[in-house]
Image: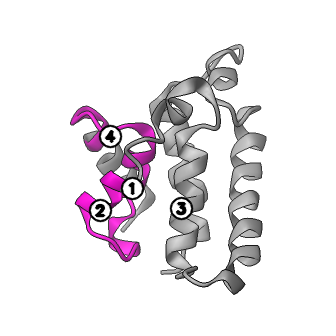
């Protein structure tokens, strides 16, 4: 699937009312080990920076996707998973100037949530195994 197709899935999910984190995960359903409803439930509370303007749901969802792709279900996987999740978050921050949702909304010339999710699609596409 192309990045553009993933972005179209993300935009459709947003139009259906899914939050930023859910929309990102749903765009990668084909590469993650959970079904659509499970991915949506997993990310339901992550939108709007955990609902209180903290870490952007896109950054949180990228980290969750990486953990799922690594099958990080054992304690010995936590360090690798945290490092890889942090690298994704740093890349997102480099592109957008912040990680906190409240800060992203205050950046001059700010991006829309859809544009931020699109950045997440591009970052995650390169980070997940085929």
Magenta part mainly helix, strand or loop? helix
* Of 122 and 70, the residue lying toward us: 70
**Foreground label between 4 and 1:** 1
Residue 109 vertical position relative to residue 33 in the rendered view, above or below: above
Q: Which residues are magenta?
A: 13-41
Q: Secondary structure at mark 3?
A: helix
Quarter of the image with the N terminus in it: bottom left
The CA distance from mark 4 to mark 1 is: 19 Å
> Which residue is the site of mark 1?
42
**Cβ atoms at labels 1 and 3 below 8 Å apart:** yes
Q: What label sits on residue 79 in the rendered view?
A: none
Would you say the residues marked 2 and 1 are in contact, meaning their CB atoms lie under 8 Å apart?
yes
User: First in sequence: mark 3 or mark 2?
Assistant: 2
- Rate crowding at label 3 as few (under 14), some (14 to 19) or many (20 or more) other CA atoms within 10 Å: many
Q: Is residue 3 above or below residue 69?
A: above
The image position of residue 69, as x and y in percent, is: 51, 76
**Which residue position is annotated with label 3?**
64
Real-space CA distance between mark 3 and mark 2, rounded to the nearest whole angstrom = 12 Å
Identify the residue position indicated by label 4 in the image: 11
Q: Which residue is mark 2?
A: 38
Q: Position of residue 123 (x, y in %)?
A: 61, 56
Instruction: Mark 1 vs mark 3: give the one in front.
Output: 1
**Dot 4 crowding, Cα within 10 Å, few <14, some 14–19, many 20+:** many
Query: In this image, 72 relative to 43: left or right?
Result: right
- Under tag 2, what secondary structure? helix
- Residue 114 x, y percent position in the rendering: 45, 33
Taking 15 as reference, is 105 above or below it? above
Q: Magenta stretch containing residue 40, yes or no? A: yes
* Residue under the point 53% across and 61% down: 64
Asked whether residue 47 is drawn in magenta, I would say: no
């Amino acid at each position: 699937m192309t990045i553009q197709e993933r972005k179209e899935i993300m935009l459709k999910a947003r139009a259906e009312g899914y939050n930023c984190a859910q929309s990102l995960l749903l765009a990668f359903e084909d590469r993650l080990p959970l079904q659509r409803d499970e991915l949506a439930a997993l990310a339901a509370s992550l939108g709007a920076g955990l609902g209180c303007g903290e870490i952007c749901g896109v950054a949180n969802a990228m980290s969750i996707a990486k953990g799922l792709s690594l099958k990080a279900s054992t304690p010995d996987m936590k360090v690798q998973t945290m490092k890889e999740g942090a690298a994704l978050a740093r890349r997102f921050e480099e592109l957008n100037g912040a990680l906190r949702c409240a800060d992203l909304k205050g950046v001059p010339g700010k991006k829309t949530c859809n544009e931020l999710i699109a950045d997440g699609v591009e970052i995650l596409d390169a980070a997940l195994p085929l």
